[in-house]
Image: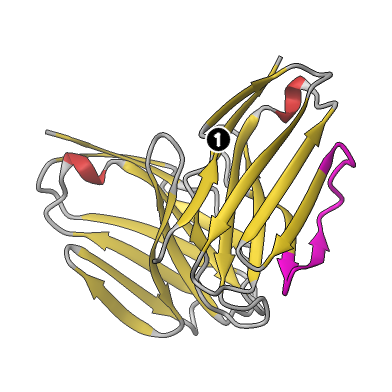
Amino acid sequence: KNEVEQSPQNLTAQEGEFITINCSYSVGISALHWLQQHPGGGIVSLFMLSSGKKKHGRLIATINIQEKHSSLHITASHPRDSAVYICAVTASGSRLTFGEGTQLTVNP
Amino acid sequence: DTEVTQTPKHLVMGMTNKKSLKCEQHMGHRAMYWYKQKAKKPPELMFVYSYEKLSINESVPSRFSPECPNSSLLNLHLHALQPEDSALYLCASSQKLELYNEQFFGPGTRLTVL
């Protein structure tokens, strides 16, 4: 069993829909990261959080430390949101343990 | 400047070639990372440098040789690679290895070994 599990693996949505991607982890962590990777490679850090909730534009990330669970929400989804979303955790220092990623496709 | 740059973007090499990948950051970060990423998989950590010293080597074959000549620059020297080494190679940096702070990733070098 992976230390970081994401669901779903693949997600297809229509433009405008509300999207949720889930992440569960089994280890004690100091921080949880949500990353975005577009086709072609580069990875962008969306959020780093250790408690509560963070919002940036149409993206919202929440974490429940007691339940070892985090969610990434995208409101009013758009085709440009199509990407792979990766959950990663740091147990100590800044070394990342990655989930397998969620491939999101938003159709116009 | 919050950017990590990598060159080249694409590289095709034969199994007998020697080539190098380059990564640069000017954010004053003292931890730098090399990752290998195969298609539809998350990145796998290869090496970590902390204050220009090799801190972590994830049992990477010796045909990959990292180098950190100064605090802004990270190289990955490649020699006698195998076709299975074809992948996206990502560089990242963070403020310090021992702090839980975010990593900034470069755009990657897509490597094809023939």
The spot of residue A26 in percent (x, y) is 62, 70
> Tag count in the figure?
1
Q: Three-letter amino acid code at disc 1?
A: Pro
Res. B13 image quadrant: top right
In the rendered image, the vertical position of residue A85 relative to residue A95, given as above or below: above
The spot of residue A14 in percent (x, y) is 15, 39
Q: Which residue is mark 1?
A: B8
**Left or right, residue B106 beside residue B113:** left
Q: Quadrant of the C terminus of chain B?
A: top right
In the rendered image, the vertical position of residue B77 relative to residue A29, given as above or below: above
Q: Which residues are magenta?
A: B49-64
In the rendered image, the vertical position of residue A22 relative to residue B98, given as above or below: above
**Left or right, residue A25 beside residue A34:** right
Q: Nearer the viewer, residue B26 or A70?
A: B26
Residue A2 shows in the view: no
**Left or right, residue B89 beside residue A57:** right
**What residue lies at 49% left-to-right and 71% top-to-bottom?**
B27
Residue B60 among those drawn in magenta? yes
**Left or right, residue A105 beside residue B5:** left
How is the protein colored in the picture? secondary structure
The spot of residue B58 in percent (x, y) is 81, 55
**What residue lies at 71% left-to-right and 37% top-to-bottom?**
B20
